[in-house]
Image: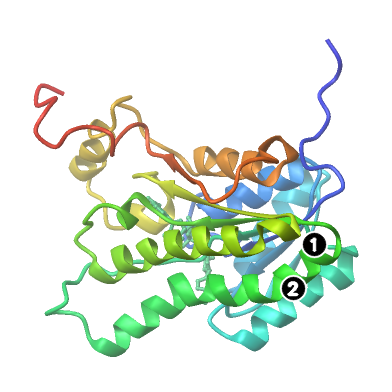
Amino acid sequence: MPERQPRLEGKVAIVTGAGTRGEGVGNGKATATLFAREGAKVLLVDLEIERAEETLADIESEGGIASTFQADVTSEADCKALVEAAVERYGRLDILDNNVGNSIRETVTEIDPDTWDDFMALNLKSMMLTSRHAIPHMAESGGGSIINIASIAGVRASKAVAYTTSKAGVIGLTISMAADHGRQGIRVNAIAPGPVYTPMVAWRLSDKMRAHRKNTTMLGTEGTPWDVAWAAVYLASDEARWVTGSVLTVDGGATMRSPHAYMDQ
Ligand SMILES: NC(=O)c1ccc[n+]([C@@H]2O[C@H](COP(=O)([O-])OP(=O)(O)OC[C@H]3O[C@@H](n4cnc5c(N)ncnc54)[C@H](O)[C@@H]3O)[C@@H](O)[C@H]2O)c1
């Protein structure tokens, strides 16, 4: 059996939100870690630079190559600067993982319209801004892979109207960019994670809610940020060379079940 080659060897990647809020590992941190383990050089972007530095320390302790960059992905100037930093530091750009996102549990009658705008800017516009500056560099070197972190909340009501709306928008953005930039060799895909256990949600979950999330999957198991990260490795790699415009659901089967069946599980 030949020794396995790292799947992202020679590639340069950007991961936004590469730190993790609070204790534990989030989707961005897990993705940046696996990208580095698979041989990519990784720019770790975060608004809270010390969070990105924690990810960097972990990656460097394993011998990986990465560096941090402080940016607010809702700012176009910062998005331009972060792309330029990746190209200046590592000479090219192959992979952009748009991971930053957050939710607020409010209905349209509860949410302040300015808060709505803030969530659209953070969850959706940010991905347009980073892509807008990444695409010309990717096109210059013959192509690339953009991965947008959506959610099953983009196709299911989630008791968080701004989150659901923005994540549905992420899916629209993904298929539009995939169509518009395919002939430049740029693949654009989304990952729709289900109820994975990360610090983003851990703080608001009781043991009962956590068990319920697990039981709503058809596998009856809990998802982790590593499940999301492995999906990102695949979409980033040349193994996915003919995959674009897709939404890869990573949810243990939570969304495939009929809402009125499997009452016994
Ligand atoms: N946990 C789940 O169950 C779940 C399910 C579906 C989708 N998701 C998606 O996963 C993504 C979150 O992943 P995570 O686990 O890495 O979250 P996280 O909150 O742990 O980490 C996100 C990082 O983004 C940084 N950040 C926040 N605002 C920023 C900004 N304006 N500019 C730059 N960085 C900023 C934070 O400082 C933080 O370190 C989101 O897109 C979320 O919608 C999560």
Question: On the image, numbered disc 1 is attached to which residue?
Answer: 93
Label 1–label 2 contact, CB within 8 A? yes
Task: Residue type at mark 2: give it.
Answer: Val
Residue 49 visible in the snapshot: no
Left/right of residue 90 with respect to residue 208 in the rendered view: right
* Image quadrant assignment for residue 263: top left
Q: In the image, what residue occupies the spot 45% across and 66% down?
A: 101
Q: In the image, what residue occupies the spot 74% across and 49% down?
A: 59
Residue 200 visible in the snapshot: yes
Crowding near pointer 1: few (<14 within 10 Å), some, many (20+)? many
Left/right of residue 168 with respect to residue 79 in the rendered view: left
* Image quadrant assignment for residue 116: bottom left
Q: In the image, what residue occupies the spot 16% across and 72% down?
A: 107
Of the pair 95 and 247, the residue shown nearer to us: 247
Tag count: 2
Position in image of residue 155 (x %, y %) = 30, 53
Position of the N terminus, as image quadrant, is: top right
Task: Residue type at mark 1: give it.
Answer: Leu
Question: On the image, numbered disc 2 is attached to which residue?
Answer: 83
The image shows residue 242, relative to residue 150, as above or below, that is above
Element on which disc 1 rests: loop
Left/right of residue 153 with respect to residue 136 in the rendered view: left
Element on which disc 2 rests: helix
